[in-house]
Image (cartoon, rainbow, N blue to C red):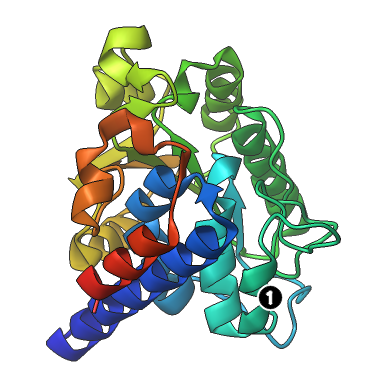
Amino acid sequence: MDRNEIIFLEDKSRHIRRLIVDEIGKLGVGHIGGCLSAVEGLVVLYYKAMNIDPKNPHMEGRDRFIMSKGHAGPALYAVLADKGYFDISELDTLNRPETNLPSHCDMLKTTGVDMTAGSLGQGISCAVGMAKASKIKKDNAYIYCMVGDGETQEGQVWEAAMFASHSKLNNLIAFTDNNKMQIDGNTKEIVSVEPLADKWAAFGWNVLSVDGHNVEEIYNAIIEAKKSTDKPSMIILDTIKGKGVSFIEAMGAANHSTPISEEQRIKALEELK
């Protein structure tokens, strides 16, 4: 990427964080920590890497993205609205009665969402199925998926990982949002997932580790992952939960899902200018 592209993606990441803070802040509560940590990964995918068309969201052969850590739905909604999948005013309806934007992703409600997020661990299984289907159809699509580090404690994740490598699904590129926290505290104190890179490699995946808030590193990792000829790829994003807003970062694991007052919303938006 040239410098102008990097600046664009960095500015876009800041803008998406403002949208996330605004939609969750207006609601008054939400999974803000894990939404803010996932931003750069989403921005690089939707504004640089993916073959998609917001005007034709069901386009055959399009790349697909599955937010397996479904509580980060508001982050995905901010990106989809900004890309034009639906009117940006809909962000104000987040998790309200009759909304098309529930707190967790729902493909039957939200234009642009490729898979519903159920219990943690299910999303990556769906991504594996989509990648297998794409291979059968020979449509040349890439399937992208984001899991959480806490989600990686689920056994279903590793069943999916094993089948993906067995099937040589090199069209599957997954990300771990490794923000090192989950709802009950620090991941290492609950059930450590380290050494994470070694685990994925042992399951037959091509593994890359990058700064999850560096858009250039993320994009370069995607390009490198596409060189794989016989393995799915896992890109481990080293991230900070609540990234970009000082007082939310300072909450630590408590920012997993937390009330956000109007005063805090305004303060956060000021920080993100």
Q: Residues within 10 Å of mark 1 (few under 14, many from 20)?
A: some
Q: Please say if 103 is above or below 264.
A: above
The x, y position of residue 104, in whole percent, is 66, 46
Left or right? Give the position of 216 relative to 145.
left
The x, y position of residue 270, in whole percent, is 25, 74
Confirm whether residue 265 shows in the render.
Answer: yes
Element type at mark 1: helix
Q: Name which residue type carries label 1.
A: Glu
Q: Please say if 89 is above or below 64.
A: below
Task: Depth check: give the residue in front, 122 or 224.
Answer: 122
Residue at 47 percent of width and 44 percent of height: 259
Task: Depth check: give the residue in front, 22 or 122.
Answer: 22
The x, y position of residue 213, in whole percent, is 22, 57
Residue at 49 percent of width and 26 percent of height: 151
Left or right? Give the position of 239 relative to 261.
left
Confirm whether residue 202 shows in the render.
Answer: no
Q: Would you identify the image quadrant in which residue 176 lies?
A: top left
Task: Depth check: give the residue in front, 250 or 137.
Answer: 250
Query: In the rendered image, which residue does mark 1 sit on?
Result: 90
Residue at 65 percent of width and 49 percent of height: 103
The x, y position of residue 235, in whole percent, is 33, 44
Q: Would you identify the image quadrant in which residue 209 lies?
A: top left
Q: Quadrant of the C terminus?
A: bottom left
Residue at 68 percent of width and 84 percent of height: 87
Q: Quadrant of the N terminus?
A: bottom left
